[in-house]
Image (spheres, rainbow, N blue to C red):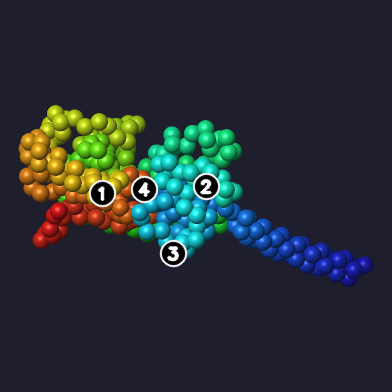
Amino acid sequence: MKGSRKIALIVLSLVLVVGAFAGLFMSHIGAANHQKKARVVATTFAVVQIADKLNLPLVGVPTTQNKIPARYSHAARVGNPMNPSVEKIASLKPTAVYSVTTLQHQFGKAFKERHIEPHFLNLTSVAKLKQTVTSMGKQYDRQSEAKEAVGEINQSEHQVEQVAKQHKTMPRVLVLMGLPGASYMIATNQSYVGNLVSIAGGHNVFSSKTQEFVSPNDEAIKKAQPQVILRLAHALPNIVIPQFNSEFKSDPMWKTIPAVKNHRVYDLQEPNFDATANMRASKALKIVSNWLYPKEGSSSN
């Protein structure tokens, strides 16, 4: 009897082990099938960059002047990120549509009528970007890719923080976002570029508890006396940058600003910079750090 019980226990153990391995195998098969069925649409270039880093297939990408990764050359173009085509997206029968929180108001009832509910990724800061990458990596079984991408950003953050620690005072920084039509907004510490400035050890002269952008105020700018000015050409840089140059030449106020006097005015352009965080954050941090704390002998714009 004892021998029979012993044999029975061995057999039971083998059954449990085999069952566990079978369950694990089936879960991997299920995850693989889920990935095959996933039909993801990215409506902004920032989301395309995240998907590319995670080796995630896309069936739809935005219509943009930015260079779309070769892996998505056959993906359908779904229109401008500010005004994507509901019809085109619906025709792709997506399982998930991604945009960013800053464009959430662009997706109106036309999407609801097509029963499409986009996911809005919060990319207003480097920290939010890392959270998003980690979350999507987990959702689409791309944890290793996500970990590598986040690690690269962490390394750059550490490097620029070490540079800032070597200086006793923080430079005063003004961040402007240019808009086509001879206008601009001021980017606060709540904006993505404002966040880059904070991480790199700069003091944004315009802060807010809730607003990413505020209207320009000449008197406030003069009073702040920024030592560095960063000008973000968010859209149509061929139009926005000449507008900035014209504004800085025609308005005598700018001639009184230390940043202009000392030629420390820099233009931020895609693909390294955008209104929302993207996978160029690591390089963007290093660029901003060098502008705030230029190495001896380096030139400025």
Q: Position of residue 230 (x, y in %)?
A: 21, 45
Q: CA distance from mark 4 to mark 3?
A: 22 Å
| Vertical comparison of 295 with 106: above or below | below
**Residue behind mark 3:** 70
| Type of the residue with mark 2 | Lys
Please rate how many residues cluster around mark 4, counting C-alpha atoms within 10 Å: few if below 14, some from 14 to 19, many from 20: many
The secondary element bearing badge 3 is classed as helix
Q: Residue at x 39, y 39 (%)?
A: 102
State which tag comes first along the sequence, 2 or 1: 2
Q: How far, Cα to Cα, is label 2 from label 1?
A: 28 Å
* 174 to 75, vertically: above or below: above
Numbered badge on residue 88: 2
Q: Position of residue 32 (x, y in %)?
A: 63, 60
* Residue 227 % position (x, y): 13, 43
- Which amino acid, mark 3? Ala
In this view of the protein, which residue sits in the foreground, 263 or 103?
A: 103
Q: Which residue is mark 4?
A: 277
Quadrant (top left, top right, bottom left, bottom right) of the N terminus: bottom right
Q: Mark 1 highlights which residue?
A: 237
